[in-house]
Image (spheres, rainbow, N blue to C red):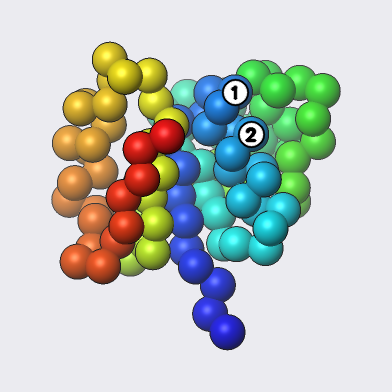
Amino acid sequence: MKKNKIQIIGAGAFGTGFANFTAKSGFDVSIFSKREEIINEINISNRSPKLPNIKLEPNLKAISKINSNLDYIFFATPSENLIDAFEEAQGFLGDKTKIVIL
């Protein structure tokens, strides 16, 4: 059975917690952040400065680019940033990508 490819846009506390839960459930999950220090901390230490007391799942990967060919994309951004985030992701969304706003 194919694992769904999922990306979370937004590496704040809510997005990171949701991404970690989804990764723990066995999905192929990446989390998008524009901040290199957050990406490095997640990928190197499996920790996030937004959730310092939680060890993140080892299969959760942080990235600085939005993936294409996703099955699902979840937007976990503040409402004032949502339009910008959606516009940035728009070119990467496939015909069958399901969009969820958290």
Identify the element where label 2 is drawn: helix
Task: Read off the residue under disc 2.
Answer: 17
Q: Is residue 94 above or below residue 46?
A: below
Q: Secondary structure at mark 1?
A: helix
- Examine the image and state in which quarter residue 92 appears: bottom left
Kindly check if marks 2 and 1 are in contact, taking CB atoms under 8 A apart as contact. yes
Q: Amino acid at mark 2?
A: Gly
Amino acid type at image mark 1 = Ala
In-image side of 80 versus 26 (left or right) = left
The number of numbered badges drawn on the structure is: 2
Circle 2 crowding by C-alpha within 10 Å: few under 14, some 14–19, many from 20? some
Residue 49, percent from left and from top = 67, 19
- Residue at the spot 64% in from the left edge and 34% down from the top edge: 17
Can you identify the residue that label 1 sits on? 13
Q: Residue furthest top?
A: 80
Residue at 19 percent across and 46 percent down: it is 90
> Is residue 65 something one can see in this rendering?
no
Residue located 59% across and 23% down the image: 13
Is 101 rendered above or below residue 28?
A: above
Q: Give the quadrant of the N terminus.
A: bottom right
